[in-house]
Amino acid sequence: MAAEPPPPLEPIVVPVFREEGFGDKFLRKTRENPLVPLGCLCTVGFLTYGLINFKRGNTRKSQLMMRGRILAQGLTFVALLGGIAVTAMKSRK
């Protein structure tokens, strides 16, 4: 009995990915978790306004802005952890 030749091999299609720049990656990550950039902006805003008040000598308002900055940083961190958790849950599905 003669052996049949093996079937012809099909070419393997390799996906081609385009290089993602900083702007593209930033927009993609912002769409995935919009609260993190918003929290960063709030943190910078509190810090800037607090430093301005410190320079002007308004220590009460400066202290209040620094406390607000800490709160904004904490909320940004929570948003970051929440985004990581959501991404991990999506990858399991």
Image: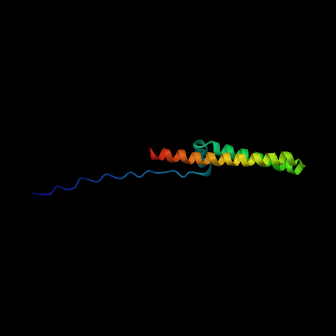
Judge left or right: residue 76 versus residue 44.
left
Image x and y of residue 11, in percent:
34, 52
Q: Is residue 37 visible?
A: yes
* Residue at figure coordinates x 17%, y 55% from the top left: 4
Counting the numbered discs, the total is: 0
Colour pattern of the rendering: rainbow
In this view, the residue in front, 41 or 22, is 41
Q: Left or right: where does residue 2 sit relative to residue 89?
A: left
Q: Residue furthest bottom?
A: 2
Q: Nearer the viewer, residue 66 or 7?
A: 66
Q: Is residue 26 in view from this perspective? A: no
Rendering coords of residue 10 (x, y %): 31, 51
Q: Residue drawn at (45%, 46%), measured in percent from left and top? A: 92
- Left or right of 23, for residue 86: left
Name the quadrant of the C terminus. Answer: top left
Image coordinates of residue 1 in percent, x first then y, are 9, 57
5 lies left or right of 19: left
Q: Residue most toward the left?
A: 1
Residue at 83% across, 48% down: 62
Pick the front one: 24 or 46: 46
Residue ID at (86%, 46%): 60
Counting from the top left corner in percent of width and height, residue 75 is at 67, 45
